[in-house]
Image (cartoon, helix red, strand yellow):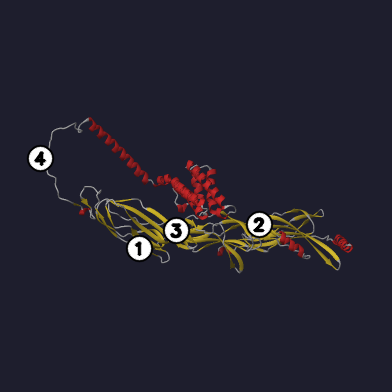
Amino acid sequence: MKKIGFIVLFLVTALALNAQDDVSFKVICKKQVVVGEQFQVSYELSGDGKNFEAPNFVNFEIVSGPFHSTSSSIQIINGSASKTTTLTYSYYLRALKEGEFTIPAATITVNKKKVKSTTATVTVSKNSNVASGSSTSAGTGNEVFLEAMPNKRTAYLGEQIMLTYKIYYNLPISNLSISKAPSYSGFWTKDVTDNNGVLQQSSTVKNGQEYHVATIQEIVLIPQKAGSLTIDPLDITCVAQIRTERQRQQGYDPFENFFGDIMGSSYTNVKKDMKSQPIDIVVKPLPVADKPASFKGAVGQFTFTSRIDKTEMKSNDAFTITYTVSGKGNIDLLDIPRPVFPPDFEVYDPKITTNSKNNSYGISGTKTAEYVVIPRVSGDFPISPMEFSYFDPTKGKYTTLMSDGYELHVERSANEGNTGIIYAGGQEAIKVVGNDISHIKTNADLRKNGILLFASPLYFILIAVMIVIFAAAMVLHKRINKFNQNQVLVRNRKATKIAKKRLKNAYNYLKIKDQNHFYEELSQALWGYISDKLNISRSQLSMDTVREMMTGKNVPEDIVNQFIDLLNSCEFARFAPGDPGKKMEDLYQKGIEVITKAEKNL
């Protein structure tokens, strides 16, 4: 024990006698960075100081900092011990523009004297990754960056484009969220991300460096107008865990390094703001030459079929005929041709059903139109084949398909009526059935019996009532026609009804915690409501146009902001940390509230 005490006393005395009086204060950083890159700048003091004064970082943006760390090391050479203390103040800066700039000196107080650090020169060059499709954002290099990857940059009008956002990283990241989603002006969009809020990670090598990579979002874009369209950047944020490198001139302390790593003091959590590069898409118009008359805007690869449940029936019996379009393309937007039925057939509005399958290859599925038809007369009737035309962008030409045609045989039913008329396929084919003629009665009593209605007061009252009813019916008929012709008013009146239906669907998905379908239905409820209410086509909708139009309708600014914030929340809620069920419930309640408020003002 005496021996150990002597050694400790010796070390303390030696350290006190050999503590360094000289101090050095220097700046350490990279010499070359690119525009938009985040990089670390450290002010390192070899000695003990206080009252650190940061410089003014002109031409650079401070992302985070300062981060303060202290280290010490002991050297024993030929029985002589010395101690070195190192103070480090670190910042993470972002380069804003090209040029050669100076990292200015910082100031610190050592032994009641102010000491200035050295300066450094940093050359900022153009971000070469922008041209190749990535936006760099890193701490001391390209550790984390976001990339937008379209599967094509030239497409036909109505052709689907797959846009994938991927994040590349080679250090731990967390709290990933979308801070601003693009408006996708000029495109119909559908989010087909299929990750249930859990990012699927893999490894890849990019630019000679190994990265982890995860798909953040997959969007199907369908251009709605020809020309050159630009997709705005996607903004995301995350927290990256960056190791703080300590550079020392004097000695290396393995114990400090070991315990520093274990206790986490060698790592710093830094908020990362990343932005994908804007993407230009050239949209070609569909060719005018050889365009079929039956073409209604379908673009992709499709099949067209029909099915009827029966071809023999009695009059006043219903039958069902279904037309189905299947394939890959803008299945949600295409129109199924409407068949032509004989004039004496009662035809109900078709039931339109769309079953689409969304994945990383795009949108595919089926769309059906189911008609319920009731023939009111007997006879033989043809139902002609229907034409369906689409444009195939892979072949660059139009294709026309034909459905099956049908021959219907309708037998006379007991409740068809006593008209004795059979319709056999055309008005020229109308013929009277039966040749019996009732004989004139020879013993008829033609004497006046009872009260006659004709020319009585009741007769004239009934005539007047019928005239009034007829006039009212005519006025109502004209108003209904005028209302139906005013599509703006029709859309306006139906906006709330359709939004309620979407919200009901969203609530059903909320109960089973199906995040993807819930956010899709909620987003469609909001976009669809504002599109119908303000008479804006879906392809022209954006955050800016919504704000401009709602403000123009004198909607209070706080309601406009709530509406815009909710639209943004739907885009990135699935990536935000926390309980998914609670997020969905909160957004659902906000959706009901904001549509109710907007309805009162619009």
How far across and how far down the image is residue 120, in percent?
71, 61
| Residue at the limit of the structure toward the left, as seen here | 442
Residue, disc 1: 401
Q: Are marks 1 and 3 in contact (CB under 8 Å)?
A: no
Query: For this rendering, which residue is in front, 370 or 520?
Result: 370
Q: Is residue 146 above or below residue 464?
A: below
- Measured as percent of width and height from the top left, residue 464 is found at 26, 34
Q: How far apart are the two marked residues, 1 and 4, measured between alpha carbons?
A: 67 Å
Q: Amino acid at mark 1?
A: Leu
Look at label 2 and name its amino acid: Val
Eye-nearest disc, 1 or 4: 4
* Res 481 → quadrant: top left
Circle 2 residue:
270
Label 3 – label 4 distance at C-alpha: 74 Å
> Pointer 2 and pointer 1: residues touching (CB < 8 Å)?
no
SS for callout 4: loop
Question: Disc number at residue 442?
Answer: 4
Q: Is residue 74 left or right of residue 467?
A: right
First in residue order: circle 2 vs circle 1 = 2
